[in-house]
Amino acid sequence: MILLENDFISISFNKETGSICSLVDKQKKIEYIPEKLSSVPFRVELEEETKFAFQRFSYELDKEHYGYRFVWELTPELALKARVWIQDDSNEVSFQCELQNDSNKSIYTLEYPIIPNIGSITEQGEDDYLAHSFATGFLIHNPLKNFTSEWNGFRYMPYPEGFSGSTMQFFSYYGKGKGGLYFAAYDGDSYTKWLNFYKNEQGFLEATFLHSCEDIGPNKGINVNYPIVIKTLEGHNWYEAADIYKDWAVNQYWCQKGELSKTDHKCDWLLDDIGLSTFGINAGADRSEWIEKYHEHIDTKMLHILGPDWTNKIQSFGSGIPGGYKDWFPTKFNEATLNAIRANEDKFAPFEFDYLFNLFGADGIKGKRALQEIPRDPSKSIDQYRFPFVCPADPYVQDLHVRRDETLQIESNVDSIYYDISANNIMKLCMDDSHGHTKGAGKQITQAYRENYIQTKAAMSRAADGRYIPMGTEMINEVFLDVLDYYQTRAGGAPAAPLEGYNVRELLKKGEAELIPMFTYVYHEYGAVRLDGWGKIVEEIGDLFYFHVARTYLWGGLYELNYEYSPMEVIEGKENTHEEHYYPFEARGYEFSPARAEYISKFAKLRTGTGNKYLAYGKMLKPFEFHVEKVNLNWFIYNCAKDHKEYNDTGELVVDSIIHSAWQYRDSSVGLFFANVSDEVKTIQIELDLASYFANDSIKVNIVTADKKVELLTMNPTDKQVVDVQIPAKGYVMLEAN
């Protein structure tokens, strides 16, 4: 074996093949690769095959670092070179690699390093977890058990891709209270890659990093000029790895604006005034009656992302999309709906499929030339990307993106703009170099999306006499954090919600997977605002509604009422019909629930009132520990496409009866939020350990409810205090220390 070790970590490589065969936490005496099974050191994807065989392997000591240099000669014209090193005082192993290609063959991807045959950490894996940035953050319990031959886990997780892949460049696998591993790519330049963790053919877990070729062609290789890092963990929780990643991530270009509380480059009304969002209310039909009804019971200003039915040529779900510029104008917004929005001091954003193109519409020939060519056989994703996407680097597309939305601003005076199935949902690859990029592109595609967003936002602002026009998209990735203001997700409404997370849906229903606020924990104080919940104001969706509302707000988001695939609530005996909609939904007849609207109102006012500086601007902290009882809540989903298997699905979910989050505003105060989703008053006992958040020797702790603020105690933050907190049924309490 080739051994590389210090006092903290040991990694070994097979002397004949260079494959990783041992990874040991020396402090905890944990061997993460318990079985010495065969494995491959790398995989190289060529045009016609994937290669993992080689003719010769050699290695030598690295004279620059404490480590080794490896060389695999696949053919006389194709060689993989890698460096692996550790620091004397570090529990971290780093890798870099380069694939040199002097052949007439084209290279598509390189998978290296491969960390194979990882076993369970705790007994039978019962306290083992995978935390991955998929769809902004999911926690999978016992992946060795729950990854199966039918679904082997996160085999291909493209980055940056928020719907089907990785939103950040790290993941962790840990055994609670025992140990674990942190995996990360420290790439500050947005190269396309995959961050994978899955069950391999030998029945063990495998972690890999797969890198895309940015310039595909004969005699062109792949230079991975960023380090891949593996680090041992204590195994406390998923926050441990997130803290490590955050130290690096907030110093990258996507955080260049700085914290929201310290920058002027932000949308004040979105952060300060909006307490609720709606999504999919018809833009082209009169929905003023519903908007007025919401305001009767929900005391907040709202952001309405209207449906796609405002364009000149049809923009719908399955019945057509616009092509070039002439298909979009003149617009067809319903004036009664817009008047109701403005009369209530709400804001609205049109819905656009900004990168989908009707090849038989206006400028069809130009659109066809601009089509994004994504490899689909296989796609290396759970998504096949079958929509008619146009490439963001194509000059025609760049011009259309800016000109269309500048005209939209002039013609309709919109408050914001929203893009669906946009950059966050699409793999960052294009094989058609006639668009002005190299074949493959990757990083160039990401930068083109960024530039189109930046130029479009600037043009809309100019057309609005300098007013800030916030921009939102479906999903999010870290690389767009500084150019987007909000994003829509649905995972916070699961399992009573469709779309992202569908591949872990059955695990969610069994309690073997859960959504975690991973993206929020790393980036919340930098933006963007999360819209989530997939809600309706009806009794029929079940009592999990109360959990979803409270969690969305306490995790720093805005709850979203959604009307894309089903009718609005029945008001005064009236339900909107599918003939006036952009999707052929089934009638329901579910009555508007004033009680549920008033429950939303409670949290919306917390968002815009006493909790605003935390929930809109704060830095998320690790939650405090306390005993919490569980509660069974039922759910029902009918708001999704009728051909989805979750349509009309129903069930029960066991959840915490108390939702809790902790936040810090700048360095001045800490807010602890508790929401009770049960029908009974709950009392919890919590230890206030605030020493790491305050430098002064005396702080006040106030208890804040929906209708009052009372001083609870004064304490020295270095002295831990145990307090009892009573939380009303279907209500919240905030403890504020400053």
Image (tube, rainbow, N blue to C red):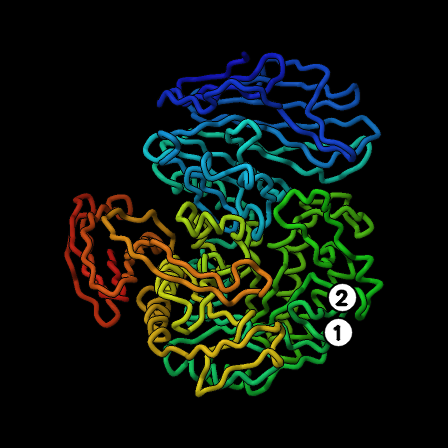
Of the residues under marks 1 and 2, which one precedes in the sequence? 1
Vertical relation: 203 (above or below) 738: above
Please indicate, yes or no, whether residue 515 appears anywhere in the rendered image. Answer: no
Q: Position of residue 543 (x, y in %)?
A: 35, 65
Q: How crowded is mark 1: few (under 14 residues within 10 Å), some or many (20 or more)?
A: some
Q: Residues within 10 Å of mark 2 (few under 14, many from 20)?
A: many
Nearer to us: label 1 or label 2: 2
Q: Where is residue 149 in the image (x, y as percent from the top left)?
A: 55, 37
Q: Where is residue 426 in the image (x, y as percent from the top left)?
A: 65, 53
Apparent side of residue 320 relative to residue 343 in the rendered image (left or right): right
Answer yes or no: do the residues labelled 1 and 2 have beta carbons within 8 Å?
Answer: yes
Vertical relation: 489 (above or below) 52: below
**Res 358 label:** 2
The quadrant holding residue 596 is: bottom left
Q: Nearer the viewer, residue 499 or 238?
A: 499
Q: Name the residue under label 1.
A: 327
Q: Which of 74 and 53 is in front in this view?
A: 53
Please indicate, yes or no, whether residue 586 appears anywhere in the rendered image. Answer: yes
Q: Three-letter amino acid code at disc 2?
A: Asn
Q: Three-letter amino acid code at disc 1?
A: Asp
**If the image is split into quadrants, where does the C terminus sit?**
bottom left
Residue found at x 41% / y 49%: 510
Residue found at x 69% / y 35%: 109
The quadrant holding residue 536 is: bottom left
